[in-house]
Image (cartoon, rainbow, N blue to C red):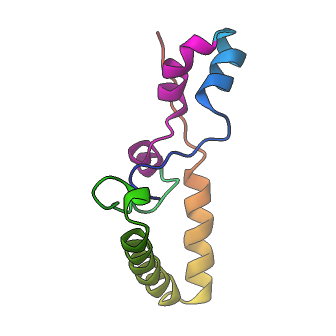
Amino acid sequence: MQEFAIYSVIPPEGCAAILWRDQGMARDAARALRLTTQDLRELGVIDEVIPEPEGGAHADPARTAKIVGEVLSRQLDEVSALDPEERIRERYLKFRRMGRFTEVMG
């Protein structure tokens, strides 16, 4: 996942509106959703954080494409080196680990 990207099934404003009936709580919802690359890496949802060029991916699309291509190529080489049974087992375990959760009180 690119360094400054976010991933979520619902925008923070929508989450806040549902949970607290207040879109103004979007900042709290964003924290609770844990949608940053650092959060998703820690949770095991993504395998790697892909660095972006100075100023972000949109500032230098050609450099961004090169970086992403290099990372994808390396990742595919690593996955391709596994025998099929091991690849399936690793993928299964990855998705099983994604089921962990934490509760935040307060």
Q: In this view, does 24 lie above or below 63?
A: above
Q: Is residue 103 above or below residue 105?
A: below
Q: Which of 106 and 85 is in front in this view?
A: 106
Q: Nearer the viewer, residue 89 or 33?
A: 33
Which residue is drawn at the image coordinates 45% and 79% (left, top)? 69
Which residue is drawn at the image coordinates 47% and 77% (left, top)? 72
Q: Nearer the viewer, residue 93 or 21?
A: 21
Q: Is residue 92 left or right of residue 64?
A: right
Q: Is residue 81 left or right of residue 63?
A: right
Q: Where is residue 51 in the image (x, y as percent from the top left)?
A: 33, 61
| Res 64 → quadrant | bottom left
Q: Position of residue 78 (x, y in %)?
A: 44, 83
Q: What stretch is highlighted in magenta?
A: 23-43
Q: Which of 96 and 50 is in front in this view?
A: 50
Looking at the image, which residue sits at the far front?
59
Which residue is drawn at the image coordinates 59% and 69% (left, top)? 91
- Magenta residues, dominant SS class: helix
Q: In this view, does 4 lie above or below 52?
A: above
| Res 2 → quadrant | bottom left
Q: Is residue 64 left or right of residue 98?
A: left
Which residue is drawn at the image coordinates 55% and 20% (left, top)? 26
Q: How many labels does the image show?
A: 0
Q: In this view, does 67 lie above or below 78?
A: above
Q: Where is residue 75 in the image (x, y as percent from the top left)?
A: 45, 78
Q: Is residue 7 left or right of residue 65?
A: right
Q: Where is residue 80 in the image (x, y as percent from the top left)?
A: 52, 88
Looking at the image, which residue sits at the far left?
54
